[in-house]
Structure formats: structure tokens, C-alpha cells
Amino acid sequence: MPRSRKSEAGGPTTEAEAAAHAAGYTCVCGIDEAGRGPLAGPVMAAAVVLPPGFSLPGLNDSKQLTARRREALYAALMDDDRVQKCVAEATVEEIDRLNILRATHLAMRRAAEGLPVAADFALIDGLAVPGFPLPQRNIVRGDALCLSIAAASILAKVTRDRRMQELDALFPHYGFARNAGYGTKEHLLAIQNYGITPHHRRSFGPVAQMSLPLEL
């Protein structure tokens, strides 16, 4: 049975994973999301199963890291075949149809179900997810406390940032590469001047209030 690893300098640990293993679960995944708040782009979720004794210096909540450090950790996680992972999304259309909370839960379910191994327990950042297909434990601030959730936060964040960089090349007026779709002053001004794109969330207030035509 994997033993809990203490983190360096008070960062995330594997105590939650160890507790799940002690309860009899054999394949424990950490799950986190990125992109609930932006006005544009999909919401991403990642699920990660770490191998026994896993350690990666600097692995922490993605929000506490520089973009350069996130990219380095992302590469290390993706290149490590021992780390089982899946990144999934809910589209802008699904966000508008379901609402952002349900769309986030959908992306989390897709990530868990898309893992190359069959997880039997999930550690989920934030609040519990109704109807989740696995037994779960929700951990508030889990990305700062739980190592597998921290790993998931990095995979979800970097994947989404890269998607927004791709959209920036297609729609350069909105600054997506800089704001990742969040409602910055630059972004809101661009919406006023150029209208919305097919990648804006029409159900979000600042977008829904715009009467300018859709930019194709």
C-alpha cells in the first residue's frame, strides 16, 4: 500500500491519497478544473493518478506558479509514463446549455472516465460533484493540499491556456493569449468594439448584454 509523502515547505502531500488507499481503494485519482470564470473558451478538467512514491520538486497549485514553471511541470507530468492522466473539456455550447457548474462537472466526469486505468476513487478540488461516477472526497483548496489534485490543476490550466493561445491567433483583437478569456479591461473593450466570437459564453452577463453581431 502506498505510503503518504510529506511535501516540502508546506506544499501538497499524498496524505489524502494514502487515506483513500487505507480505506481499501486501489486506484485514486485527483481531479481539478480550469476556466470556470472566463467569458470565453471551454472549461477544462484533468484527472491524474500518481504512482507510489511519486515526487516532483515544485509541484504545487497551478495558481501559485509562474507560467514558465507550470509549463515545465506540465512537460514533466506528460512525459512520465508512470503518471496516468486525462484532460477533458466541456465546450462553450455545453456551458451555455447546462450552466457553468454543470458543465464543469461534465468535464470532470469525462476526465475521470477517460483515464487509461480504471480509477475507483476520486479526490476532487472544491465542492462535491453530484452524481459523480466514482466514490469521492471533496477537498476545499485541494490543489494546494493534495498532490494528485495539484498535478491535475497544472494539466488543466496549461492545456486550457494553450487552447486560448490558439484562439488568440484566430481572433487577435481580444487578447486571449494574455487574458485566457477572462473579463479584463482589454477584453471587455474588444467585445464592445468588435462584438463576440463563437467562442464567447453567451450565458455570461457581460457577453449576454452585448447587442453587437456575432463575429465569424
Image: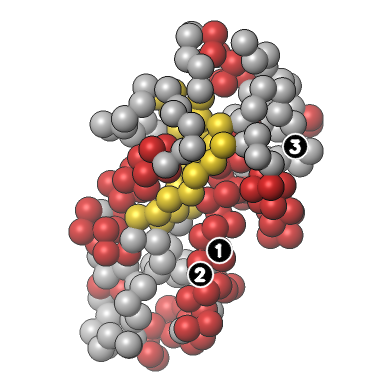
- 37 vs 112, nearest the viewer: 112
Q: Is residue 27 visible?
A: yes
SS for dot 1: helix
User: Which residue is labeled 3 in the image?
Assistant: 56
User: Which residue is labeled 1 in the image?
Assistant: 161
Where residue 49 sits, quadrant-wise, is: top right
Label 2 amino acid?
Met
Label 3 amino acid?
Leu
Where residue 195 sits, quadrant-wise, is: bottom left
User: Which residue is labeled 2 in the image?
Assistant: 164
* Residue at x-position 28% and y-position 46%: 102
Label 1 amino acid?
Asp
Q: Are marks 2 and 1 in contact (CB under 8 Å)?
A: yes
Where residue 58 sits, quadrant-wise, is: top right
SS for dot 3: loop
Disc 1 and disc 3: Cα gap in Å?
22 Å
Q: Would residue 127 appear left or right of 70 to someone viewing this image?
A: left
